[in-house]
Each structure stands twice: as C-alpha cells, then as structure tokens.
Amino acid sequence: MQGNNMRTKHLSLKLIFNPSGRATAIGLALTGAATFLVGTTSRAEMCSAEKFYDGTTFRYSICNVSDLDQRRDELPPFTAGLPNGGKMYCAPTSAMNWMTYIANHGYPGIMPGPGYWGPEADPSQPQYNTITSALAQMGSLMGTDPVDGTTGGMDVGIEAWLGSFYGVGDFVVSSFAASGSYSPVFSDMASFALGDSLVMPVIGWYKSWDEAPQEVKDALLSILGYLPTGFYRNGGHVLSMAKAKNDFQFQQIGFRDPASDNGSTSDQSPFVTDIYHVVEESHNFDGESRTQSKVEGIGTHAFLDAYHAIIPKYGLAADQNFIIFIKPIFLQEEGLPPAEIIKTFASATGGEVTDLAIHPSKTKHPYLIENDNTIYEIDALTGRSTRFATVGNPKKIVFGGREQRLLVLLPNHVISLGLEGRQMAIATDRQALLFRF
C-alpha cells in the first residue's frame, strides 16, 4: 500500500544528444499477437508479446514479468519476513518485478540477478529469501514505512538501486501524479509502455464524502454548511503493468499485483496477470475537477492517479527538415523484433526544424519549423506530425512549471500553452524568462 501524501512529480528526461540541448523519445509500433480474457476481471495465464499502436487503438503485452508477493510473514526456521508482514511494501515489490525483468533482459548485473523467481520446491526457499532480502533493501532506499507505506522516495530508491548494481545509468526514472486539473490517464501509461518504458501504475483508493468519518463530516458541515461532492483519496496501491488494450469498444489493463497472493504469505504464489476494464470518469477529486481512469472490479472507487516509469535513455535531434529519434538503450524482449536504434521522419511541411522540446508526460513532442507560426508535435510511436497550436512568430519552446506547460518565446514576450494548445498565461518581462530557454 502507498500512503496518502504521495509527492507530485513531473520530471523531464535527462539525456541530450543534439547540440541544441533538446531531447525526446523514439517510439515503436511493433505487432504480434496478444491474449486477453473477457470480463470485468480475469486471470490471464497465456502470454504473447506485442506492441501495437496505430494512433488510436493499441495493444501492449510483455511476457516473463515477475509477479512477486509483497506480503511476507516470517516462518521459522527457514523463511524470513518483512516488517509488518510487508503489508505496505507494494512500491518496493512493484519495482522489484522490473528489477528482475531488467536482469533477465540484458542487464544481469542488476540485482537480484537473472533467473526465475516464482514458486520453488526446496523447503528452504533460497530464491524466496533472496527476494525478501532484496525487498527489504529496496524499501530502505525508498524510505518505506512498515505502517505508512512509501510516500515520496520511490523514484529515488529505484534510481539508487539501478546505479548501485550497474553503475552506468542507462535508465531514467520519472513519475507523474494528479495535481490540480491534471491527472495522468490510462492511455498515458500505455503510451509510455509502448515506447519501451516499464510502467508502475498507482491506484488511488477513493471514498465519497458521504463515506467520510463522522467527525470529518461534522467539521465540513460546520465550516462549509454542506458536504462536498466527489471523492477524497484514502490511500493507494502500486502495481506493475504487463498488459494494456484499447480497441475502440473498451479498455483493459493487466497488472502484476503485489497484493494478489492467494492468501500465501510465507512462500511465493504462482505468477498471474490480473486484467480489469478501465473507463474514464470526471469528478471532483480532493476538491479538484478532473478526469481520471477508473479501474473496475478492484475496489469500489479505484482510480488511476499516478504512475512511475523506468525509461531506457533516448534522444532526439533535428537535421535540417528531419527529426531523428535515437534509441541506444533497449531491453532484449522475447517475441518482439529488435528495436531500431535510429529512426528519421520528415517535418510536417518539409521545412527546416528550428527547435523542439520533450514532453514530460506524453509521447508527442512539440517542434518549430522555420518561418511557420504553427507549433507541431510528432508522435514518438508513429512518427506522424500534427498541429498543436498556432502563435505569432515562435522562436523557442520548452516545458516548465509545476504543471509542465509549454512555454513559447515570442519576439517580445513569453506565453504558456495548456495540454490542448490553449494559451494559459502571458509574460512581457522577456529578459526575466530568457534563462528558461
């Protein structure tokens, strides 16, 4: 479980390849065959690797992902446990699923190392105890509290783990969380996964204000004279995403769920993927009006409101009228064709690209074309360019601020654009803002 006070972070990627100092991502559209079971929730045992995206629909599935159990009780004389039985260790466990995956797919130096970490016949359970020790170490790096969970150190812990056991730094860890009117939604998580990131969605457990403790309701009635509408967050849970699907009719997400252990708390349960339907709903969440993705069947009011992503480093460059995606780091995934290290796409009009910026939470990245008032964006997964916004003579672009809006330098002032390209603010003190560019 994850505590209520999860820190909001919007981190841009850190790798820069081209001389202008901008970076962005390469994306792939790889096809294969996937198995999804129909129903609100189901257990998918078969797995075929697939990464497919056509600009609207998508299918994502990767195989051989660990499904480690977070709840671990001590069972003498052989089996160690976790503090408080691991009840609040979902964040370290979700991350460890990906550490074992990375170790098995080209990085054997990442601990706990390559191998199969599922159920074992040996009563002394050496594999299980190795994972329990690793989870305790990861929890320490994340600052996981046995009672309150992980409230802000998840990314730092993962980065420290990867750095300690490999040392080169081929990965970036970023997180995106609901704040104000913004919330990441299911399709954002799927896009990152299709772009070869390893994604850990966060489900927020929400309650309606009618369900609040009586003393809370009494206080609200005394202050406001009424109970607010919508929901408030009452804890959360981190999982590993192994499947995602959107085929126009419905959306499905497949979790390796650390809490899904079939009641087994002193040995590893069989690996399974739990699949749920996902729908978008708009409500007031913690007093803010926004749209969040509801996961049906896992709880009464379970909404995706954040995610963490382990991202192989990548870059973007512009050469005259071409945009070049560069992907030097990739995992050796079974059932998928090898990743292309370099992919080149022409700009939207064939004009010369003068500036570009990486989107911190999307796979579409904006760029400018010489003598063109339009800001375009290129889809890293398909290579297609579309119009984002039209402004007056843009010179430079960069993302910044808590909500990661696109800042656009014009000849005499700076404007900021929202997620849909609408102008949100204007600043006339050009000199004070030049440092951002």
Image (cartoon, rainbow, N blue to C red):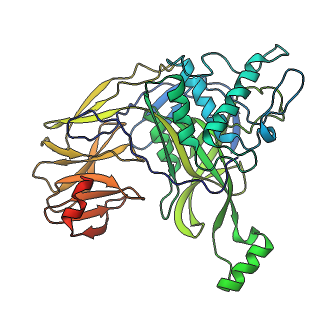
- Outermost residue on the right side: it is 76
Q: How many numbered marks have been drawn onto this rendered protein structure? A: 0
Relative to 285, say whether 197 is above or below: above
**With 157 as the anchor, is 265 left or right in this view?**
right
Residue 362 position, x and y percent, is: 40, 46
**With 50 as the anchor, is 383 left or right in this view?**
left
Q: Nearer the viewer, residue 273 or 46?
A: 273
- Outermost residue on the left side: it is 371
Residue 393 position, x and y percent, is: 14, 59
Q: Nearer the viewer, residue 5 or 117?
A: 5
Relative to 23, say whether 294 is above or below: below
Relative to 69, say whether 112 is above or below: above
Tell me, yes or no, if residue 285 can be seen here.
yes
Residue 90 position, x and y percent, is: 68, 40
**With 18 as the anchor, is 231 left or right in this view?**
right
Tell me, yes or no, if residue 256 can be seen here.
no
Residue 76 position, x and y percent, is: 90, 25
Q: Nearer the viewer, residue 158 or 34?
A: 158
Residue 44, picture quadrant = top right
Q: Residue at x 44, y 27 (%)?
A: 31
Relative to 253, say whether 407 is above or below: below
